[in-house]
Image (spheres, rainbow, N blue to C red):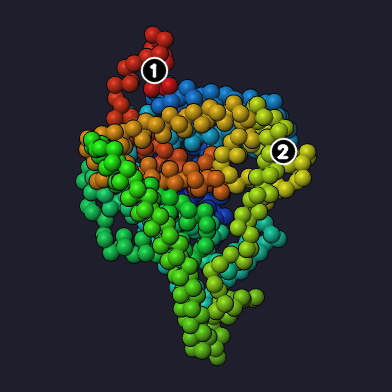
Amino acid sequence: MTAVKSFFDDTSLFRRIYIIDLFCCMISFVQVLGYVMLPFLFIWGLRLVYFNQRRYNTFFKMRFGIWIGAFMAFSLLAILFNFTLTALISVMMFLHVFICFFIFYGMHTEPDFNFKKELYFLATFIIIATMILNSIGFFCLLFGVHFEWNFEDLYWIRYPLYENRFTGVFFNPNLLGFVSTVGIVCCHIIHKDGLVDEIGKPKFNRVLMAASGTTNVFALILCDSNAAFVLALGYVLLYVIYMFFDVKRRMSVSKWIAKILTVILVCALIAGSSMVFRTVFKAGFAVVNAKTNALVDVIFHDEEIINEIEEEEEDNSEATFEHENKNLDSGRFKMWKESVGLFKISPIIGISNGNIVFYSGEYLNGALKYNYNNNDLHNGFLTILVSTGLIGGLLFGTFGFRIAKHSFQHLYWQEKSWRSEAYPCLFAFLGAYLVYACFEKALLYDISFMVMWFWLFMGYISCYVVKLEPDLESQYLFNRKRLTRTML
């Protein structure tokens, strides 16, 4: 009995299982099982929110907790003032936000918690899992194994191509693009000597790391996800900028100007060359794919081994790995236009997240619907603004600004370099993710791997901030020991 209680009291274990389950929710053939497990894990997470508040006093020890508490209060107010038939969705998202803030971001309130061990475990899992899954996808793509299945437009599998784009075993090419970017970042993090040395782990096998990195880069390009490509490119550019300014040095104005111009030139060169490489690689791989598929057809034509698993197979030799929909915004402009009308309904306190689709059909043009592609504004910032209004948006923005300021301050304004640590990797990914959130249903109001990975990294970077600001724990607001300066 004690072992069972210890199991369910382990917050780090919950985070690991929750992230792995959400990862499985993106894989076509195990997605249903992942969603079956999700409600039980969700309840476990809510239990830990309550339990950790009792044993760790989480809220009052949380960095910038005042802004989080105020945001949660106004989110609840938005639900009460907009109580409709979809209130259950709003409540569920409200509870989901508790898990984001208290279990993931709030991990820095757990005493004697070695977050680097957890980071190493999850990064290793992502590296190995993406390498295996992407390799399976590439093998099937090159050898003509193709599978499609529909269940009344409620659930479908497109394997390994989805609308002319590589999707492998993942449900959607955009999900594959995000996971591949995360895999690349995890390879970079595991490569850091400071991480593995501190937790006493052996260095990760370089062959496996190179194989994982290569398959993830290939998958990122062939899935043709523009948002994921921006995320990966943003990560690289932010890390390059960090490398130029990683240690505080006294320099003349002319040297600063020269360094800034050099950074701009290098970043422009990286961005331009990566886009050219992306285009050339897709064209080249399309030719290779056509040749391998033609060869397989010749070898197995009489036996018809490949075609037995297909009913309506598309001609894979014509795959170009380009969007069939030539619309650059993929319908996002229509959603963003709809968000203006939704915001006008309740600009101060918002309409609550569960009412976004409901109010779209009830009061506006009905551009948003309860389906996979149109149930969100595909912009994390707009979703928060519409859901919680100006007040909630301002409070969430203040929280984000505070943690960004402190993490930036400790990253750049110091006498030593962090290059051997995971800290700059976390910072670069979070910075790039904020741009990515402008185009995807990310940031907060979505129970998905994308959102929880963001809050996982927010938790890790908060652990670094706490480590660098230990004196704030002993400073109090209003001369009362109930409110510390860490909350502000």
Q: How many marks?
A: 2
* Residue at 23% in and 54% down: 203
- Which of the 4 quarters of the picture holds residue 324? bottom right
Residue 479: give x, y in percent of width and height: 39, 8
Can residue 463 be seen here? The reply is no
Q: Amino acid at mark 1?
A: Thr
* Residue at 48% in and 70% down: 282
**Quarter of the figure that contains the C terminus:** top left
Residue 298: give x, y in percent of width and height: 51, 89
Can residue 118 be seen here? The reply is yes
Q: Secondary structure at mark 1?
A: loop
Residue 467: give x, y in percent of width and height: 29, 31
462 or 320: which is nearer to us?
Answer: 320
**Quarter of the figure that contains the N terminus:** top left
136 or 219: which is nearer to us?
Answer: 219
Q: Amino acid at mark 2?
A: Gly
User: Which residue is denoted by mark 2 in the rendering?
Assistant: 341
Q: Secondary structure at mark 2?
A: helix
User: Which residue is denoted by mark 1 in the rendering?
Assistant: 484
Question: Label 1 crowding class (10 Å Cα cut-off): few <14, some 14-19, many 20+?
Answer: many
Query: Could you tell whether 178 is left or right of 261 in the image?
Result: right
Q: Is residue 69 above or below residue 429?
A: above
Query: Could you tell whether 262 is left or right of 329 in the image?
Result: left
The residue most toward the bottom is 302
Q: Is residue 401 above or below residue 370?
A: above
